[in-house]
Image (cartoon, rainbow, N blue to C red):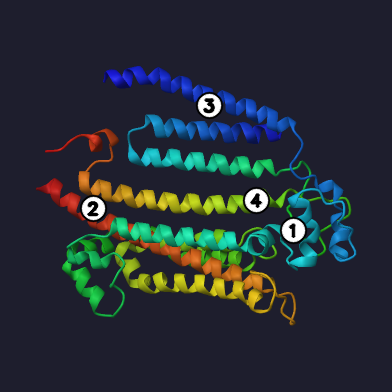
Amino acid sequence: MILVNYAASFFLIALGLYCMAVKKNLIKILIGMGLCDYGTNLLVVSVGFNPGGTAPIFTAGEIHPGMFFVDPVPQALTLTSIVIGACTTAMVLGLIIRIKAKYGTLDSTEIRRLRG
Amino acid sequence: MNDSRASKPVLAVSLLLILCIGLAAAIRMAGSAPTYDGRSTDVSVLQQDAHAYDDSGADGVAAVMVNENNEKTAADNVVYSVVFNYRGYDTLGESFILIGAIAGTTAILRKKGNKASAAIVGTRGDAGQEPLKVVSYRTDQKSRTKYRRKPVIVKCAADFLLPFATVYGWYIILHGAMSPGGGFQGGVLAAGTVLLVYLAYGLTGIRKVFHSHFLHYSETAAEIVYVCIGLAGIAAGLHFCFNFVFPAGREESAMLMNDAVGYHVMAGISCLLIMMLEALDTDDGSSREEKKS
């Protein structure tokens, strides 16, 4: 079953790269960046998964003999990744706002063109 | 045009190649053993008496962290203890990324030589009179009509949902030591209330309700609090981010660090959202004027 997670994460990364490479609208390029980000997060979380494992929390009264934990380290690393992704998205959105104000368009081919 | 035509097959082939390599890697990874085999650790025995548990069988970083978690950090949630105890420095750096993003967005969205730029984040909201002047300097009538035009249903729904959204965000922050969640996730959820207020009351509502100047400063203050709690471990002769357990009960100093990070993220993301909404409004006004003329 973990194969579905891995395949979906790589599919998301490829889809994000497709969006960034093909689309001309800056917002769509940003969505592609976000898709890449989420794909990577899904991949890192899936790496730590262990079938049948529970969340790595020592809750009082809910731990029974025979239970075992999944890997806590990738989950903690994903936290870092999520925050960085959110900050990048916010900064790119700020840049897009400025570009729209300056050029009046969101089309990347229009922005690239020389103006006189 | 010629260039783009030639590059399309290349692009398709390279994307297919990436996808195929990814799928091959996925199949290979799915067949391999998990990074941490939790079955070798008896969790229920470990919870009852962490000091008596035999750590010699620990294989790898995750096993060591799980086996020594109760003994060394006194936190229930292992992910939380990894973030705030084992990797305390890293969490500090992560918060600085947020500060950097806010500084970058402030620099990008700042307007040069325009008095209305003060409305973005700098001096407005400082005194009671200044922001009003700035608001009236800009398109006063427009914002007023916008304010009135908001539909009643959205306003009522936002009024109904605002307390729940705030309480849910702060529940995630404050309960981070015992359940999934913590400062980072809860902070973002609590900052979502800015968007709720914007949907219901527009930019005028945000200007009235939120004190973005105060948010901007208190965010940095929360970061300083985090560093001070981390340094308390060094002052006591132990290591950075040492988890002190208070004598009263189950409270630890890492919980305070978690709360500081939660406030930091909430204030930072709110600041970012307010800055962006302010910039969007000015742009909308100018572009509409351009279109009319």
- How many angstroms separate mark 2 from mark 4 (CA)? 41 Å
Q: What type is the residue that disc 2 sits on?
A: Asp
Residue B239 visible to the viewer: yes
Q: Earlier in the sequence, mark 2 or mark 3?
A: 3
Mark 3 chain: B
Residue at numbered disc 4: A75
Q: Which residue is mark 2?
A: B284
For the N terminus of chain B, the quadrant is top left
Badge 3 is on which residue? B18
Of pointers 1 and 4, the one earlier in the residue sequence: 1
**Residue A59 visible in the snapshot:** no
Q: Determine whether B225 is above or below A55 in the image.
A: below
Q: How busy is the neighbourhood of tag 3: few (under 14 within 10 Å), some, or many (20 plus)?
A: some
How far separated are the C-alphas under marks 3 and 1? 37 Å
- In the rendered structure, the answer to whether residue B136 lies left or right of residue B121 reads left
Under tag 2, what secondary structure? helix
Mark 2: few/some/many CA within 10 Å (<14, 14-19, 20+): few
**Residue B201 image point, x, y percent:** 34, 64
Marks 3 and 4 belong to one chain: no
Tag 3 secondary structure: helix
> Is B236 displayed left or right of A54 in the figure?
left
Which type of secondary structure does the marked residue at label 4 adopt?
Answer: helix
